[in-house]
Amino acid sequence: MIKAQNLLAGVWEDNPKATTFQSVNPKTKKPLKIHFQEASDTQVDEAVTQAATIFDSYAETSLEKRIEFLKAIQKELETVRSEILQIYQEESALPEGRAQGEFDRTLGQIQLFVELLEAGSFVQATIHTTGPDLRKMLHPIGPVGVFGASNFPLAFSTAGGDTISALAAGCPVIVKAHPYHAGTSALVAETIHNALISCGLPAEVFSHLNGTSHRVGMKLVCHPSLKGVGFTGSFAGGKALYDLAQSREEPIPVFAEMGSVNPVFISEKRLAKDQTLSETLAQSIALGAGQFCTNPGIVLFCDPQGKSNLVEHVSSHLNLMKLPPMVHAQIEKNYLAQLEKLSQNKALQSLLKSELSTAAVGLVSGKELMNHMNLTDEVFGPFSLFVQCHSVEEMNAIAEKISGQLTATILAEKEEYPNLEPLIQKLKNKVGRLLFQGVPTGVAVTQAMQHGGPYPAATDGRFTSVGTDAIYRWLRPIAFQDCPNQLLPKALQNENPLSLIRAIDGKPTRKAL
Amino acid sequence: MIKAQNLLAGVWEDNPKATTFQSVNPKTKKPLKIHFQEASDTQVDEAVTQAATIFDSYAETSLEKRIEFLKAIQKELETVRSEILQIYQEESALPEGRAQGEFDRTLGQIQLFVELLEAGSFVQATIHTTGPDLRKMLHPIGPVGVFGASNFPLAFSTAGGDTISALAAGCPVIVKAHPYHAGTSALVAETIHNALISCGLPAEVFSHLNGTSHRVGMKLVCHPSLKGVGFTGSFAGGKALYDLAQSREEPIPVFAEMGSVNPVFISEKRLAKDQTLSETLAQSIALGAGQFCTNPGIVLFCDPQGKSNLVEHVSSHLNLMKLPPMVHAQIEKNYLAQLEKLSQNKALQSLLKSELSTAAVGLVSGKELMNHMNLTDEVFGPFSLFVQCHSVEEMNAIAEKISGQLTATILAEKEEYPNLEPLIQKLKNKVGRLLFQGVPTGVAVTQAMQHGGPYPAATDGRFTSVGTDAIYRWLRPIAFQDCPNQLLPKALQNENPLSLIRAIDGKPTRKAL
């Protein structure tokens, strides 16, 4: 059963006096039955304080124990799979296929962290034997706050990459549930709680807070015992949390992945040659009703003569697509308001709206875009602005002016590559991921993924929120100098009892000392 | 010859209208001859703008070229070794042995980065071949600003760890020289400039700015093209730069290592047994006239009966030592003012001042310290506060309350270790380095070193400013998806032309694909 209460260090604490709220079915616009209780300041404090109290003990748990815990989360999730899929669809209006895909992705993400813990070498054990005996490894930073993301009720929310990477690192987690899918979040929270109990781990390792007001999140971020924050969402939201965290007496890192317009650059020859381009782009634009942080918000195509019908073709494809509503009426309202504003923007040559959905595409010349760089601001939803460029040089100039992005995509023919080198060079400085085929939507969860990018795409482009490297956000090095072997963490002991790959005097090895 | 001008992208630009200042010999209190020109706002802008212009080209230099560059810096430094040692001593009053030691340490640090570049694997090439072809590696972040440190005119200044790690990473560097050793800094700057020229690298890679006012540093940190900052110094200075960098339109990382009191915990048995303890501590306290960020500012000893004469013995040793003056009259003035204030603090049982120097030690009970935690604030200079504790539990309670530190040291006998586990556990959360022998002064430059710690010891405890891992402050990952082999950086190409250790589908290997 979905709990309306907050989960505080193992207890679903009922607060009859709490303000309550309901999540809403975006299709019917009707509120669901459950009245979720907003967390009080005292409850936020309780969650973080308990997490801090248990931190040392959880940080010292063996990798085996954490593996057992992550596997138990997978198992518990499977147990309530159908319940989760049902409430997921009610709260998000996303179709069943997407719900199932995201559920499986969430399980898969957990599996990757299981494998990371099994390999164990992520602790980066480093030993130097000449001079003083120095042995360094990564250690968890402390309790972490995670904000659920509106657009990914599972994979970027309660048991998503932020939570799982922090738990794998050895950090207790306090989730601030996204109110748009409070029910999904509460169900998932219960699976994590059950997993803790089934493994004999302290319940204080995980808490789950409800809230529609900014107050709950702000109180969480400002708690002196919190040591880090994970967030996926809007620039305004992420930047506000970041600034708040920097204003604390002890500033803490906020890893906010704040979205991006993910420019796609199409060369003249590719434009002429690729017959499937408009359909591929239309599908990417419409995916998840445009609510992907890697949505291609800007498509620049090299069309010196202005002869291409790319925009019209993309629009035709979009015209045939039925899209679900956006995950919340407010998000859709914001989106439609931005479209309305664009329709009055004289810099645009055209704005083609779809018939069966809210999807739309705009067209602007490269020259006009350069004069109105605010047109490169994100329009969150199934919209893309097409930019007709007269030359590669014009593309280069736009790339130079564009702000930090999660991704950029270059679609070109082999013989054009030499001419595109300046563009590639410029884009390297702007993005976390650079694609040469396909579309930016679809973020593979592997060690080689970089999901994050230079500001303002993310608050810290040195880290990723997708893939196993996401764990490094929650770890910091500690060096032990001349430490007796029995007092060292196992990862650093002479015998290498965990059989890790360690750097000994600069050489990677599994050998004992 | 020592230049009075600012070095701007290869040109020692004379500005006859500039405000000037002189560095001062701390022994004679007399100003040296050279009138250094304060950098103007235009000059700061010029330095960063030129660095940004050249960034792409420098970022793409081969590892071989950067090795050649670093070796050329070593060679150029050797050429002017005697001149540097002379001005170093005039400006810092530190003795010749220290000057030589720091010079050699600086060369040694450069050598370690040469070896890091030779191995090459620090770029962390990661390849995933199933699903989309994803290849990730680290890429330099952009122009970096480095602030010289007053207490290490060579090893933590112009060609110190911050500058060399950034240059090794592929980032252009703009140094804001510390005005206390402006002459030393200018000479070293010239060696870096000469090394660039001798290697045929663009002169814009390195600039050097003078300034006594905060204006120059503030202008540098606020420049929109600057992407990161390295700083070693006071909490006030580091925190001000950090806050400034966070207030920019694009916040940038500031790696400020802001010092610490480096608590030393001495067990009851070690106290009773160790006959050399007081001398070892006295030498550590007096080292470099107490101007080490790892100076043991607080020494807690377990002495339930209050019978130990540790403080008196340390004081006796200090009484025999002649110390150089501190590196600047103002620093010494601040230090003496803090001592004066302590002498009026009724919580202290005693304050023993030395006869031949400004060194001093204080004594306070653990109970009083708990009531006056501001006594754990850093007193920068040859001072240490000794804390008589009645029990291990009292030590634990103090460890719990103490703020983030660069180091902590536990000196105990083997049979006491089980009893000390809670203390070790608490200290892990507070420090970057935990020692079990010796004293915290002396920071080995190896891959296993962690110099940095939880706030307020440093602004970002996830990174180190000493050792080869310092390079990771200036790098961020970029993932290439489905990128044609010839367009990939060499580190990621199929053939593995750089023979790096790469993670391919999770396994480290030097094999080609």
Image (cartoon, coloured by chain):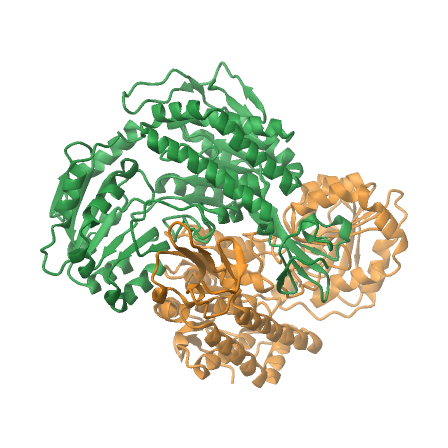
Chain colours: A orange, B green
The image position of residue A499, as x and y in percent, is 50, 69
Measured along the vertical axis of the image, is residue A65 above or below residue A483?
below
Q: Quadrant of residue B177?
A: top left
The image position of residue B300, as x and y in percent, is 21, 54
The image position of residue A368, as x and y in percent, is 76, 41
Camera-side residue of A177 and A364: A177
Query: The C terminus of chain A is located in which quarter?
Result: bottom left
Q: Quadrant of residue B42?
A: top right
Camera-side residue of A183 and B84: B84
Measured along the vertical axis of the image, is residue B485 above or below residue A72?
above
Camera-side residue of A460 and A11: A460
The image position of residue A258, as x and y in percent, is 59, 56
What residue appears at the point 49 percent right and 29 percent down from the top-left corner? Answer: B77
Whether residue A85 is visible to the viewer of this picture, yes or no, is: yes
Instruction: Tell me if B308 is positioned left or right of B244 in this view.
Output: left
For the image shown, how many numbered marks are present on the structure?
0
Instruction: Tell me if A253 is positioned left or right of B433 in this view.
Output: right
Whether residue A46 is visible to the viewer of this picture, yes or no, is: no
What residue appears at the point 30 percent right and 54 percent down from the top-left corner? Answer: B437
Instruction: Tell me if B87 is positioned left or right of B336 in this view.
Output: right
Residue, far top: B16
Measured along the vertical axis of the image, is residue A195 above or below residue B479?
below
Measured along the vertical axis of the image, is residue A458 above or below residue A86?
above
